[in-house]
Image (cartoon, helix red, strand yellow):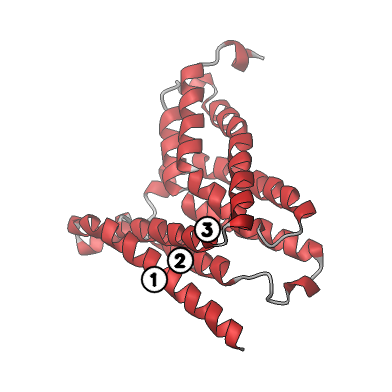
Amino acid sequence: MEFFTTIDWAVIAQIIMIDVLLGGDNAVVIALACRNLHPNQRRRGIMWGTAGAIILRIILVIFAVTLLKIPFLKFTGGILLLWIGYKLMVQTEDDGDHELEASDKLWAAVKTIIVADIAMSVDNVIAIAGAAGQVDASHHQFGYIVFGLLVSIPLIVGGSQIVLYLIDRFPIIVTLGAGLLGWIAGGMIFTDPGLIQYLGNHIEAYSTAAGVAAAVGVMALGELAKRSKRKK
């Protein structure tokens, strides 16, 4: 109870805003991962995937200072996102996945959500840790982080539901979503501290171009793979 009586709502508001603003792309990933689930399972997939992602994000925030020192963390996350974007685009409802047990499809979607969220949340985690750092360590920094992230959950879930609704009516959103992951991945790779250490600070200037190239590449490869599947 002491936490709620001494809480600094300005810091909580910052954490929520960071998570919502930087979590918009996470809502897209959640929607893409759950789009092939039966309508009755979509809500469960979103809830379980978001819950798992939030729990792991809390753990990552705790170790944010250490994570900043790990070279090639963002590089690895960017490569992982490129693969996830490609796989999400190639997956279609006519792949024969209907023969799988519903539970298998559900937990596969949950796993995709969690893995993608980990890869995409490096900047998010660092920003949240910075916001919580405004509070003295004796005033429950961890409590601020957990409370702020828990409050943001319904906002992220709501965003995912909206994206799912649009995907059902405009399939092109799947392609654009894969492109978004490529864009984020390109930027992550070219701003990785380990890569900068070896190649120099000048490579950061190419992060935007790398994002564009990665986005186009993921969409093009995904489209080629889908056409190849149709021919078979």
Q: CA distance from mark 1 to mark 2?
A: 9 Å
Contact, mark 1 vs mark 2 (Cβ under 8 Å): yes
- Which residue does the image show at 46% across and 59% down from the upper left? 181
- Residue indicated by mark 3: 173
Rendered image quadrant of residue 153: top right
Taking depth in this image into account, of 5 and 111 the one nearest to the observer is 111
- The reply to whether residue 155 is visible in this rendering is yes
Residue most toward the top?
5
* Residue type pointed to by label 1: Gly
Residue count near mark 2 (Cα–Cα under 10 Å), binned few <14, some 14–19, many ≥20: many
Q: Which mark is residue 217?
A: 1
Q: Which quarter of the picture shows residue 126?
A: top left
Q: Name the quarter where the N terminus is drawn.
A: top right
Q: Neighbour class for label 1 at 10 Å: few (<14), some, many (≥20)?
A: some
Q: Position of residue 63 (x, y in %)?
A: 49, 43
Q: Amino acid at mark 2?
A: Leu
Q: Nearer the viewer, residue 195 or 29?
A: 29
State the SS at label 3: helix
Type of amino acid at the residue the image marks with label 3: Ile
From the viewer's side, name the closer residue of 114 and 224. 224
Does label 2 or label 3 sit earlier along the sequence?
Answer: 2
**For mark 3, does the 10 Å Cα neighbourhood hold few (<14), some (14 to 19), or many (20 or more) residues?**
some
**N-terminal label among 1 and 2:** 2
Residue under pointer 2: 82
**Left or right of 216, for residue 85:** right
